[in-house]
Amino acid sequence: MSTRHFLTLLDLTPEELQGLIERAVELKRMRNAGEIYEPLKNRVMAMIFEKASTRTRVSFEAGMAQFGGHAMFLSPRDTQLGRGEPIEDSARVISSMVDVVMIRTFSHETIETFAKHSRVPVINALTDEYHPCQLLADMQTYFEFRGSIKGKTVTWVGDGNNMCHSYVNAARQWDFKLNIACPTDFAPDQALVDANSDRVTIFESPEAAVKDSDLVVTDVWASMGQEDETKERLREFRGYQVSPDLMDLAHPDALFMHCLPAHRGEEVSEDMMEDPRCVAFPEAENRLHAQKALLEFLLTH
């Protein structure tokens, strides 16, 4: 059977993705009940980090340990990747010694090249273009709190970044409507929007976009690698902060999510993070459970 990778949400079918969400809920129940389940005993995951991380590293490393396996942390300082070895060569070597590779990097092309030359599954733990693992956690969280997201309206407020791109793919795979509120110069990839024009609508007004939504999501205005743009972005995104007042325009039972870390007072108000509609912390924990379901799927099916 050919090796399955998880570089974007489109690498799995809608049925497989929903199966992962339901399995993640079950794995969460098992862990909370203290059940020992170690399907990945003696399996090793290489974790290649070119971008810093809290939730990604902790969730993947803890998940492999809980499954009876081992996770190996590799930074650019620890490998020849950071010294100019071709990605193809690194992929061949690393994948000959481990069972799965997780990569958090800048260019999406890097992870595609690595996967092309890897003999084991490769997981995208974030690139500048996509962040599919976060979407697994987000979709699990909505499922746990509100049930099926099919046919609902989700609103993304802020930068048309990697999270926004993954929400476009999620709208396609889970069959929901997506409103995107962003300044004109910070819109998501036009080709991706055009390919999903039947369910994605771009707004300049956050208020118009959030109206009657079931889920509202945001992210930092300046991502890793964009620190030098922070002042300009703070100016351009003024008016795009998610606050309780903005959330009041959504449905009464709407949820608010943020992939964290949150810059309180910028993309989200301080009181919004403490609002009962905010599920950012269960969402963060679900990175662990959703990724365990993904690892089990890629390595045992």
Image (cartoon, rainbow, N blue to C red):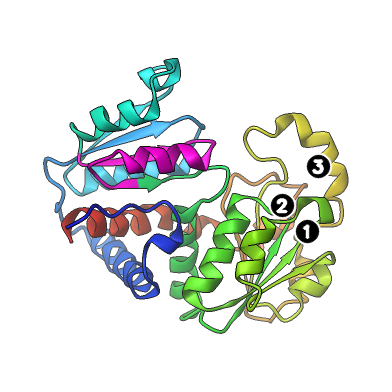
Q: Element type at marker 1?
A: loop
Could you say where residue 277 lies in the image, as x and y percent from the top left? Answer: 63, 69
Q: Element type at marker 2?
A: loop
Residue 159's tag is: 2
Q: Say whether residue 34 is left or right of residue 138.
A: left
- The type of residue carrying mark 1 is Cys
- The type of residue carrying mark 3 is Arg
Mark 2 and mark 1 in contact? Answer it, CB < 8 Å. yes
Residue at x 32%, y 72% (from the top left corner): 19
The quadrant of the picture occupied by the C terminus is bottom left
Mark 2 and mark 3 in contact? Answer it, CB < 8 Å. yes
Q: Say whether residue 164 is left or right of residue 282.
A: right
Q: Say whether residue 35 is left or right of residue 175.
A: left
Residue 182's tag is: 1
Q: Nearer the viewer, residue 39 or 14?
A: 14
Query: Rounded to the nearest whole Å, what is the CA distance between mark 2 and mark 1?
Result: 6 Å
Could you say where residue 237 lies in the image, as x and y percent from the top left? Answer: 82, 50
- The type of residue carrying mark 2 is Asp
Q: Element type at marker 3?
A: helix
Query: Rounded to the nearest whole Å, what is the CA distance between mark 1 and mark 3?
Result: 11 Å
Could you say where residue 4 lies in the image, as x and y percent from the top left? Answer: 28, 55
| Residue 277 visible from this viewpoint | no
Q: Which residue is mark 3?
A: 233
The quadrant of the picture occupied by the N terminus is bottom left
Number of disc labels: 3
Which region is colored magenta?
99-122
Q: Mark 3 Cα within 10 Å, few/some/many (few <14, many 20+)?
A: some
Magenta stretch encompasses residue 103: yes
Q: Mark 2 Cα within 10 Å, few/some/many (few <14, many 20+)?
A: many
